[in-house]
Every structure is written in structure tokens, then in C-alpha cells.
Image (spheres, grey):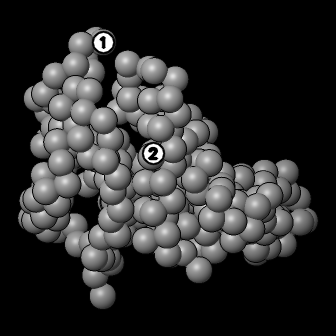
Amino acid sequence: MWNAQDIADAAAGAIAREEARRTAEGSPYGVESLDEIALHPVIESALRDLGCGVLREQVYPAEWSARRSGRGRRKPLPEESERQRCDFVLTPRPEQALADPLREQREANESRRRAAGTLFEPVAEAAPVPAHPGLRPDEVYWLECKVVGQFEYHAGVPGPNGSYASVLVRGVGADLRKIRDDPSVARGGVLLVLFAADESVVRADLAILLHRLMDKDLLVRSPAIAGVPVPDRIGNGWAAAIVMEPMRSG
């Protein structure tokens, strides 16, 4: 159902359209001037054009489930603010909702609390966790988005990105781990929007990135890549949309 190349193509097309709009308006700032959050609506529009549903800022499902003491007793469930979130979740069709296993677990815990010390306590303890309507985590596609430029604006001033390589490896690596390490996530990937001097730089730096990830025991499927030229305003002449999906051992 989920095709990484389709996602990369859609994102690259959206970047090209946004750049063309800015050029037509005579803006001195290209799409590369948008930070990660500001670029999200552009990416969201492209993903919706694929015909799927798009949910923003969804919590990862299984991260909290490991919070148990050594003797199997549950620790307090995390607050919403403590949970990691994914930039986009793609559903098979628009307007579909996503079920949240943590909310279901909270309801089960509350039922057990109310039944404690009553005749119904054994029944409540043995009852399964209720399932809410909505798609399960393994029925959707989890997509993180990272934006990195070889040349970027810092405090409004354009120039070379001094932390380009480190941000590239750290940012992509952290998001790949979140997707790989959540057993409830069956499919997902990282959409890397990479601005660089030209296409050859993008491909060379992608090869280096993949080797650095392998050094950190992060294996990915063959990346899907799509690119478009952009006006060279600050040193970047190419924008690439790259989708990388983590591989699980075994």
C-alpha cells in the first residue's frame, strides 16, 4: 500500500511548486528558508495528493509499554507531554482516525482501580484492555520529516551550514531508531528534505550518510530519491526528497 518512491516524488513536486510560487511573487527567499515546521504544510499537501489520509503529530504507540518495574508491576503511565510524536501518520483513506493503545490502557487501569476491594476485582483484573474504534498502529505508515541544508539561514544571514554533517547523521538516525524500535509500527520511514549545491553533492552525501548509519547499526532499505533544481539564492541549487525506511534484524 505504501510506496516510498511515491512519497519522495510527491514531496519533491510540492517543493518545486512552492519554489515556483515564490519565484513568481519575486520573493528573495526560496523554499530553503523554511524551517522544518514551516515546511510541514507543504509536505502535508503533497501527501494528501496521494489519496491517503494524513494525521499530524501522532504519538508513538508502544514506547510507554516497557515502563514496568523488575517484578512486573506497572509504573505510572506517562503524561501526554512525555510521549514522543511522529510528524506524519498516513492512513489508507482520508478522514480515518488512529487508535491509541495508551488511552485504552488508562481506561483499563481506571476500571481496575474502581473494582479494587470489591467482588468484581478478579473480573476487572482478568478483563482484556478495551479496543477503541480506529486504525491500529500497524495499519498505518509512520513518517518523520527532517530538513537539512548545505547552506542555511542563521539569524537571517545565509551561509554554509557548519553542523551540516553532524545534524544530518544525528537527526536522521534518531528518527530511524524511533520507527525501528517500536514493535507496534509495521511500516514507516524518514523523509529527508536535503538542500545542496547540486545533485551530485546530494548523492555523494547520501552515500556517506548511509555508511555512517551502518556504523551505528542502523540498516535501511534502498532509499527512494527524487530531486528538483532550485534557484541558487544562497548556495543551494538542488532540493532532494529522500525516503529511508529502517530494517529490523531478523
The reply to whether residue 69 is visible in this rendering is no
Of the image marks 1 and 2, the number of the one nearer the N terminus: 2
Residue 76, quarter of picture: top right
Which residue is rendered at x = 41% and y = 33% of the image?
Answer: 31
Viewer-nearest residue: 85 or 145: 145
In this picture, residue 38 sits left or right of residue 249? right
Image side of residue 219 versus residue 242, left or right:
left
Residue 15 numbered mark, or none: 2
Q: Position of residue 150 (x, y in %)?
A: 18, 37
How many residues crowd mark 2 within 10 Å: few (<14), some (14–19), many (20+)? many
In the rendered image, the vertical position of residue 160 relative to residue 238, given as above or below: above
The label number, if any, that marks residue 156 in the structure image: 1
The percent position of residue 136, horizontal first and vertical second, equals 67, 70
At horizontal 54% and vertical 75% (from top left) the residue drawn is: 2
Secondary structure beneath disc 1? loop
Residue in view at x 33 percent, y 65 percent: 225
Amino acid type, mark 1 = Gly
Locate the C terminus by quadrant: bottom left
Residue 55 in the image, given as x and y percentages of width and height: 65, 52
Quadrant in which the N terminus is drawn: bottom right
Give yes or no for contact between labels 1 and 2 (Cβ–Cβ under 8 Å): no
Q: Residue furthest right?
A: 119
